[in-house]
Amino acid sequence: MTMLATIFCPEGGHFALALACALALMQGVLPLAGLRRTDSPLTALARPLALSQCLALLFAWTCLVTASLGNDFSLKLIAETSAINKPWAYKIAGLWGNHEGSLLLWVTLLSLWCAGLALLPGQSAARPEGLPLRLRARLLALLGLVGAGFQLFCLTTSNPFLRLWPVPADGMGMNPLLQDPGLAVHPPLLYSGYVGFAVPFAFAISALLDGRANALWARHMRPWVISAWALLTLGITLGSWWSYSVLGWGGYWFWDPVENAALIPWLTGTALLHSVLVVEKRNLLHVWCLLLAIATFAFSLSGTFLVRSGILNSVHAFANDPARGLFILGLLGLYGGGSLLLFAIRAPALPTPQAGFSPLSRESALLLNNILLCTLCAVVLTGTLYPPFMQLLFGRTLSVGKPFFDATTIPLTLPLLAVMGVSMALPWRQTRADRLLPRLAPALLITAGNILPAFWLFPTPLAALSALLALWVISAALCDLILRLRGLPEGSRQLHRLPRSLWAASLAHVGVGVTILGLCGMAGSQERLIEARPGTHATLTGRDWELTALTAHHGPNYEVVEAHLTIRHHDAHGPVLTELTPEIRLFPRQGQRTLHVAILHRPLEDLYAALGSVKEERDPQGQSHYSAILRLHENPLASWIWLGGIVMALGGGLHLLPSRRRPKPVEGELRSCR
Amino acid sequence: MSASFPLTRRKAGRFWIILACLLCLGGAVGLVLNALSSTIVFFMAPSQVLAHPPTPTRTIRLGGMVVAGSLHTGRASDDTPEARFDVTDGQAAVTVQYRGILPDLFREGQSVVALGRYDGHGFTASEVLAKHDETYMPKEVADALQKSGRWDPRFGPPPNAADWNSMTVPHPDTPPGPGAAP
């Protein structure tokens, strides 16, 4: 351990970070200079530079992890967020639960994406469909420039390797709320998604510099968009599940600026995912696609940094650390503003497509999807930015919450779902209504057959309508798969013969439908709040909840109070359904307590119990009685929300699996994009 | 619209696109304006609530300090915990009724924000927020206190809420606490 600690000392990490920054700058400048000539050795430097930058950053992480595991409280970051008795897993996971560590994670993930791009086999005589080498060098250079800026930010204003003097004997400990397995995985996933959109951004900038955005370009870009999108989807799903199961308020989405900051790039990223298909298959919409790629990355950047730096929540965040705020604004202005300027100058010169849109075609449906998704994004953006702007401009304090977002996003999501169902059955180019209707008929029948049950089962007409549309999406995706299978020639009607992209799209659409059904179910959640002594019964939607006992014991760095609940069918004498033990954890070091919710996930509902607090009362004889404040929920279809998110991401993952077939040549001749 | 005139078809296609965009945009603007006018939640201090009572259907955020000694907790007939407390900004106080669990950091004499409706007599809260940190005061509450002239942040932490309604003359010349940094 001491040997390791000597090699991976914080100064080594600090040096590695500085080295990575220099390497990233070289990765950004040298290949771009090399690309100005046709055959320069500088171009080939992009790949080794990207790999060595990644190694340097991984070295820096190792140093930070070594220091954290070795309880080196001479590091400011570790003294502020760790403590001796913290479980070792959280000594690692806790490193990205703060500003400096999460920034280091951000740049490291970017370098990992670069390394992925560098390691992917490029175009060669044996693999003509590979990524052209010059395009790859340009992409790596652009990503190097992005990385260099943020590593400089990390080094100058948010250095995780700063030392502290005098060295404290023990650290201050992590925020107990973050001591949760979900939160250990959530930031890396979410950040990989955010950062992943840097690759499509680099594709867009490269196309603008090149003056060429064609179908082949879109085909090379598509897997990167899909992988970033799938990771972001997983990250958001996990975040939402965390707030449901850890915060203990029974909700799954609070329309909080931090949550919206992830939703906004997800919406534009989803639009990008679909518009890339139109560019690839029909060579249309490429200017729009470029703009979306730039916007998605710009939203990811501002989402990660503006929100965390507190600018959105409070205009005074600048006063706390003016250097940080100004640096971030400068970087955002440079990358976002610079690329938009480049777009404004170069986009009009891009060759315009000659084909058009016919109203009944898949490209029109995808276009409509893009319009609706971007409108949704604009609405969420307005709701998020309105309060800080009102505060800044007029000094009026107000807040925009769930009622606003419900009133604006639901009416826009419903037509989106309707289009989603139709889009799968539409062919590219053109079709006629009399050919389309038979393809949609089975899904329409399924949906129509469920109208009455939906209005009977769901609590509000709006929830029922949304659920019907979700069912429409699911059934349309599945029916389309079956119809296409029957369309295959006799004798080869096996599921694996269908193209994988079709499977992936159907799966992702089914995931959306499942999530929407979950949201509709949650609209009918039932809640009861009781103050109860052991032995008390409460009824909630035809079940009996009994508080049987209150107990206390010790955890590794906290103390626990548990409430033991027994849930029975029907009434107090019914058969036992389950037992739940929600708990309160007290962290003496931080003087904080966290709720630990107990949830029983069932296919059609969640039974959810949270222990709010425990009170001690003394009766006239001087005996103390304990009573607990309990929050009991019955949440219909709750787990479907996150299940759908996972299915969506799986759809993305399925798309990425290598296909056994050679891709068909794209429209026009197959040529390398320089 | 016929396929033999590609240019016309292109124009028709473009027409559909523009129509869809305009419809979407118009719909979104309408939705946003409608939602902003009805669902926005304004922050109000107790003196503002008493001076300009909001309509009883309107949700507001009431913020201030919990008056010391004003908290009464009880239990409703269906075992739901209930709480009643007064919130003041130093000029006026409003009584808040709340059915639910008070947050852990809810304390008498500390800042609080309650989300709910004012019916002309009392405030019925649907949510009570006390932020994570004992020394932290919600920015809105701090601003309201400064506006009401009860607290100058240059002179240390806010005064105890219990004294406020008895405080008659603020003493800007004699700082109440030893020179705390802003």
Image (tube, rainbow, N blue to C red):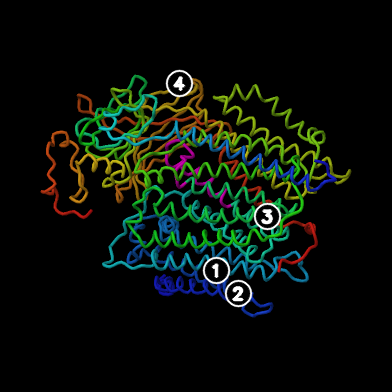
* Mark 3 and mark 4 residues within 8 Å of each other at the beta carbon: no
* SS at circle 3: helix
The chain containing the residue under callout 4 comes to: A
Instruction: Return the residue at label 1.
Output: A144
Residue A656 visible to an observer of this rendering: yes
Q: Rate crowding at label 1 as few (under 14), some (14 to 19) or many (20 or more) other CA atoms within 10 Å.
A: many
Give the percent coordinates (x, y) of residue A162. 36, 67
Instruction: Return the residue at label 3.
Output: A286
How far is the residue under mark 1 from the one under mark 2? Answer: 10 Å
How far is the residue under mark 3 from the one under mark 2? Answer: 26 Å
Q: Amino acid at mark 2?
A: Pro
Instruction: Return the residue at label 4.
Output: A572
Q: Rate crowding at label 4 as few (under 14), some (14 to 19) or many (20 or more) other CA atoms within 10 Å.
A: some
Q: Which numbered dot is residue A31?
A: 2
Q: For the point 78% across and 63% down, which residue is it?
A: A670
Q: Rate crowding at label 2 as few (under 14), some (14 to 19) or many (20 or more) other CA atoms within 10 Å.
A: many
Give the percent coordinates (x, y) of residue A281. 75, 52
* Mark 1 and mark 2 residues within 8 Å of each other at the beta carbon: yes
The chain containing the residue under callout 2 comes to: A
Magenta residues span A231-258
Same chain assignment for discs 3 and 1: yes
Q: Is residue A9 left or right of residue A512?
A: left
Q: Amino acid at mark 3?
A: His
Give the percent coordinates (x, y) of residue A641. 56, 38
